[in-house]
Image (cartoon, rainbow, N blue to C red):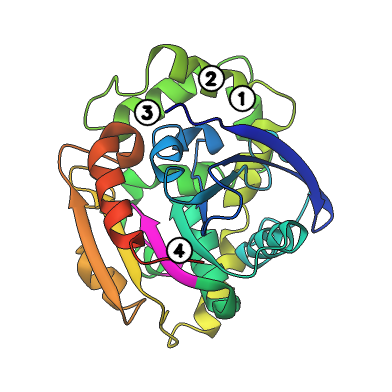
Amino acid sequence: MTIEIKHHTVQANGIRQHYLEAGDTTGAPVVLLHGFPETSFAWRFQMPELAKHYRVIAPDLRGYGETDKPAAGYDKRTMARDLVELLRVLDIPKIALVGHDRGARVATRFAKDHPELLDRLVVMDNVPTRIVAREFSPQLANSYWFFIFNQVPDLPEALIAGREDLWLRHLFSDWCYNPLAISGAAFDTYVEAYRRPGAVRGAMSDYRAIAEDVAQDKVDADIKISCPTLSLWGADFHAVGKMFDMAAVWAEMASNLRTVAIPQAGHLPQEEQPELVNAALLDFLAGWKG
């Protein structure tokens, strides 16, 4: 059976949001939030499988892909509100939410700010921003250099312009267990996305909100996420699974927790080991009826 993936755009929370959709529109809704340096294209292996059972929606986050890239609003509370307003436009009262990397940060803030809209949560290869800030060290800085670089005003855009392929090749090769996991047409798709006007600035703006994100996270640091939560990560990524005790990290964040480490995967497990990730997602989502 061929699953059709449709492109849509709507005005929600004051910006034009682009999202992919697949599956029966009457099915239980599952929302997928991509990370950096990706777009909704990151979910190309998950959408066809999940859509056999669910209504699947994969937005481009504010600043990424085909969604607007305004000058402000990249703190995670505002980005979570982007999703709230998207759901309102689509008349969806409750979701299962899957977030990877930056999308997991948005999903975490969504879970804390809007628990009534959330049935269950998946966070992929993500150490929460507050914990990264708390544990920052020379060793961590070696792997998280881009957290600093991306926050420098204007310079990343100037250095990356015309060299988007070199920039992305470094990130994907360094972050994946197989350095060439993102290659060919998939790699070209990401390069094309970041060559569009404002795309690099949009992604950098996401990181330039880190101080505001940490401040938001500190206010409710003692409040754990109560809905069923799956933390999934690539077992072989030097900056996450190899550096942090991920089960302990997420036990600090969520009270109803399941954890899965994906072997032979780095930072992009959904693209590197899609069959294993899909199996873990389907197992965790079982029982979600909408």
Locate residue 74, reporting x and y percent.
67, 55
Looking at numbered disc 1 in the image, what kind of residue is underneath it? Ala
- Looking at the rendered image, the quarter that the N terminus falls into is top left
Residue bearing the label numbered 4 = 129
Q: Nearer the viewer, mark 1 or mark 4?
A: 1
Which residue shows up at 55% across the image and 16% down it? 163
Residue bearing the label numbered 2 = 189
CB-based contact (under 8 Å), mark 4 and mark 3: no
Q: Tell me if mark 1 has few (under 14), some (14-19) or many (20+) residues whose alpha carbon lies within 10 angstroms of its own.
A: many
- 119 to 232, vertically: above or below: below
Furthest residue in direction top, as rendered:
184
Which of the 4 image quadrants contains residue 243? bottom left
Q: CA distance from mark 4 to mark 2?
A: 28 Å
Q: Tell me if mark 4 has few (under 14), some (14-19) or many (20+) residues whose alpha carbon lies within 10 angstroms of its own.
A: some
Report if residue 63 lies within the magenta region: no
Locate residue 99, reporting x and y percent.
46, 54
Furthest residue in direction left, as rendered:
263
Q: CA distance from mark 1 to mark 4?
A: 25 Å
Kindly identify which numbered label has been placed on residue 172.
3
Front residue of 160/10: it is 10
Along the horizontal axis of the image, is 161 left or right of 10?
left
